[in-house]
Amino acid sequence: MDELDVLYQGALFLSGGSRRSAESLIDETAVAAYHAGVASAGELEPNPLERLLIRRFVAVSDGSGGDAAPAVKDARRGESVGPISAEGLYRAAGAVPPLARAALWLVLIRRWSYEAAAALLGVDVEGLKRLLAYRDAFMSAVMSSGGAEARRVVE
């Protein structure tokens, strides 16, 4: 059951919080797993179902990761931010291009090695590092979302 939770969280992150897109991605992953004869992860690392999820996402996304991370305003510096909801995190993920979003999920959140993430995404390690440069844009969106979430909780 934990494995399905992780897959759904990943699908929500990858889809920028769109439940409909996340559910479609999970459905497509389940069908691909069935056809490929993939079982649950068990002791395997990284998780083969998560690999299929990322492959499906990359296949259906436009595949763009951008050439360079966009300039990000240094908003909210020094301002404390309240708790960040899962929904805020998923929406913040939507602020970066799809391939960069997949790289952020694998490396920053799921803690995959650079080599394993790069191989799955079909880029070299240097290309992965360029995709991970979007973490600043992602964190800026997280902080903005977190502040809005915190204000709603307080009000």
Image (spheres, rainbow, N blue to C red):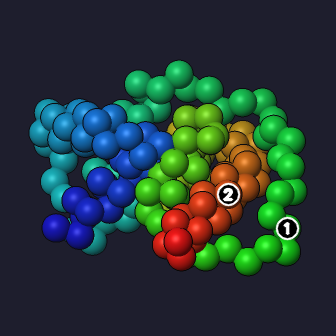
Percent x, y of residue 17: 42, 46
Drawn side of residue 114 relative to residue 153, left or right: right
Percent x, y of residue 34: 12, 39
Task: Quarter of the image for the N terminus: give it.
Answer: bottom left
Q: Residues within 10 Å of mark 1 (few under 14, many from 20)?
A: few
- Residue at mark 2 to residue at mark 1: CA–CA distance: 11 Å
As rendered, which of 72 and 6 lies closer to the eye?
Answer: 72
Question: Which quarter of the figure has residue 107?
Answer: bottom right
Which mark is first along the chain, 1 or 2? 1
As rendered, which of 50 and 11 lies closer to the eye?
Answer: 11
In this rendering, does residue 29 appear at all?
no
As rendered, which of 59 and 142 lies closer to the eye?
Answer: 142
Residue type pointed to by label 2: Ser
For residue 41, above or below residue 24: below
Residue at left 64%, top 65%? 147
> Residue at label 1?
77
> Residue at label 2?
144
Q: How crowded is mark 2: few (under 14 residues within 10 Å), some or many (20 or more)?
A: some
Residue type pointed to by label 1: Arg
Drawn side of residue 107 relative to residue 7, left or right: right
For residue 114, above or below residue 152: above
Residue at left 47%, top 66%? 85
Mark 2 touching mark 1, by CB under 8 A? no
Drawn side of residue 73 relative to residue 81, left or right: right
Residue at left 59%, top 68%? 151
Percent x, y of residue 4: 22, 59
Tally of numbered discs = 2
Helix or strand or loop: what does disc 2 sit on? helix
Percent x, y of residue 60: 41, 25
Question: Which quarter of the figure has residue 44?
Answer: bottom left
Residue at left 53%, top 71%? 155
As rendered, which of 28 and 74 lies closer to the eye?
Answer: 74
